[in-house]
Image (cartoon, grey):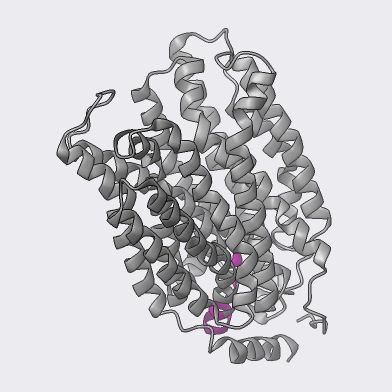
């Protein structure tokens, strides 16, 4: 058994800042894909909406499997650079290439092959390369430091750069595409993707060079010698013995279902507010308050437990969403509701990822197996599956309400369906997430758990 070094758990400010570069790189791919891939496939490549829907639906299956598989693979990785950083280094070039492939469609391909090419490149890019990069990146929160407070700073940086990137992507993509030529030309989109790819590779390289995994895995169950001896099945069994992981993955899943319902914004602007151009402001107000709130969350976590911060955020979200439900056609009140809802979402976005690092500590303490990779794969799993379920729910509720595409006016049931997706269902979801967080009482146990783990590693 190796010995553990006594170390200063504080992270340099520069490392806290550059940690957020990983999530900025993530949004250059995932937000661009979520916001524009459907348009690229239909209006640029020429695929039908039904084919595109099929591509995105089946890709979700690969997404769910790849996240958990990559988490298990990270847990079985152990070398001098850690378990997560080696994967970030390996994926820098593939990440850039995948981003370009995502928005490429060779003109010489026949129509039938274009759909197959789109499906293959989508799965390779998002279910493959994106997952193989971002699961290790999320894992870094748990392996960079054993200090719960420092994990909060890392999560704050991650959230600020992530939502800042999402905000900028939504405003910049079409302008960059237009700068390279016509919006309907595939080559213009490929060049835009090449710009994002280059920036992403630089961001990931800086992240890799300026990061360090300080949580040294030296206990008997997770030492370098034993890392390969713990089977994936044993890791998964240990995972489901960790009640706090179950609580968090369900909470994240619910939160991302709410995000997946965001596709209702354009319908809400058109049929409830009567002005489709207002969708841009609705979109901006969905991101900007979260970005602003993320700067404030660390001050809250310095005074309150993460559980309390999450509950406070949920109550603020509930207040904002209730205003949306009560004043659906009053645009001034809608703006106020969106701002309050966005501010309430920030604590969950920041504290949630920091809590996953604490959950990894609890898992090691309880089972002797540290499953950082699998535990943090819950984040990308929840993001992809939750947003997918949200999109599916959106379609089902709209269909049940009798929505008619392209109609000048909609029936009363269709209008009710739009309002339900925009406010009523999110209210139910935030209440459900709040109930789950009430059962999360790890914060008060964590100091003793940390002492016990350190004692095991030393002795």
Horizontal side of residue 366 vs 328, given as left or right: right
Report which quarter residue 5 is drawn in.
bottom right
In the rendered view, does 325 fall on the left or right side of 266? left
Residue at 51 percent across and 29 percent down: it is 37
Residue for point 59% across, 25% down: 103
- Residue 188, compared with residue 225, is above or below; it is above
Instruction: In the rendered view, tell whether residue 325 sits above or below residue 54.
Output: below
Q: How many marks?
A: 0
- The quarter of the picture where the C terminus appears is bottom right
Q: Measured from the top left, where is residue 67 in percent x and y?
A: 52, 52
Residue 304 x/y as whole percent: 56, 82
Q: Nearer the viewer, residue 96 or 329?
A: 329
Q: Residue at x 42, y 58 (%)?
A: 255
Which quadrant would the N terminus be assigned to in this image?
A: bottom right
Q: Is residue 46 magenta?
A: no
Query: Looking at the image, which is closer to me, 121 or 74?
Result: 121
Q: Main secondary structure of the magenta part?
A: helix
Q: Report x, y in % for residue 354.
A: 60, 70
Q: Is residue 229 visible?
A: no
Q: Residue at x 42, y 65 (%)?
A: 251
Q: Position of residue 360 (x, y in %)?
A: 57, 73
**Residue 368 on the magenta segment:** yes
**Residue 256 lies in what quarter of the image?**
bottom left
Question: From where the camera sits, is residue 205 visible?
Answer: yes
Q: Relative to 401, does residue 104 appear above or below in the rendering?
A: above
- State which region is magenta: 362-372
């Amino acid at each position: 058994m190796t010995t553990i070094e006594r170390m200063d758990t504080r992270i340099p400010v520069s490392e806290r800042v550059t940690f957020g570069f990983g999530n900025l790189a993530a949004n250059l791919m995932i937000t661009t894909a979520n916001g524009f891939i459907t348009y690229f496939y239909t209006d640029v490549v020429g695929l039908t909406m039904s084919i595109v829907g099929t591509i995105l639906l089946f890709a979700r299956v690969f997404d769910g499997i790849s996240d958990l598989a990559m988490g298990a693979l990270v847990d079985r990785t152990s070398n001098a650079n850690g378990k997560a950083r080696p994967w970030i280094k390996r994926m820098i070039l593939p990440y850039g290439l995948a981003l370009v492939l995502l928005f490429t469609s060779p003109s010489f391909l026949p129509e039938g092959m274009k759909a197959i090419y789109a499906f293959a490149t989508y799965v390779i890019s998002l279910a493959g390369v994106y997952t193989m990069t971002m699961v290790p990146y999320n894992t870094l929160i748990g392996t960079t430091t054993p200090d719960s407070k420092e994990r909060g700073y890392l999560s704050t940086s991650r959230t600020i750069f992530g939502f800042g990137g999402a905000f900028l992507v939504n405003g910049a993509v079409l302008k960059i595409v237009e700068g390279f030529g016509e919006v309907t030309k595939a080559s213009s989109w490929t060049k835009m993707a090449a710009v994002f790819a280059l920036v992403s590779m630089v961001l990931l390289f800086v992240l890799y060079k300026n990061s360090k995994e300080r949580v040294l895995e030296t206990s008997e169950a997770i030492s370098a010698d034993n890392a390969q001896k713990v089977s994936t099945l044993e890791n998964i069994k240990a995972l489901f013995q960790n009640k706090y992981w179950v609580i968090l993955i369900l909470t994240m899943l619910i939160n991302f279902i709410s995000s997946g319902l965001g596709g209702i914004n354009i319908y809400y602007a058109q049929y409830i507010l009567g002005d489709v151009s207002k969708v841009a402001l609705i979109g901006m107000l969905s991101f900007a308050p979260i970005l602003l709130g993320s700067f404030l969350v660390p001050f809250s976590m310095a005074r309150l437990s993460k559980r309390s911060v999450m509950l406070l955020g949920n109550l603020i979200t509930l207040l904002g969403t209730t205003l949306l439900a009560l004043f659906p056609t009053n645009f001034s009140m809608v703006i106020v509701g969106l701002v309050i809802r966005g501010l309430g979402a920030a604590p969950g976005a920041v504290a949630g990822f920091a809590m996953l690092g604490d959950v990894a500590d609890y898992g090691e303490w309880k089972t002797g197996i540290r499953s950082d990779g699998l535990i943090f794969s819950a984040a990308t799993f929840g993001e992809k599956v939750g947003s997918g379920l949200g999109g599916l729910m959106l379609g089902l509720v709209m269909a049940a309400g009798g929505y008619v595409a392209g109609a000048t006016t909609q029936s009363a049931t269709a209008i009710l369906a739009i309002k339900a997706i925009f406010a009523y269902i999110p209210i139910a979801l935030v209440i459900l997430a709040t109930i789950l967080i009430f059962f999360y009482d790890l914060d008060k146990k964590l100091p003793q758990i940390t002492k016990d783990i350190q004692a095991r590693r030393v002795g």
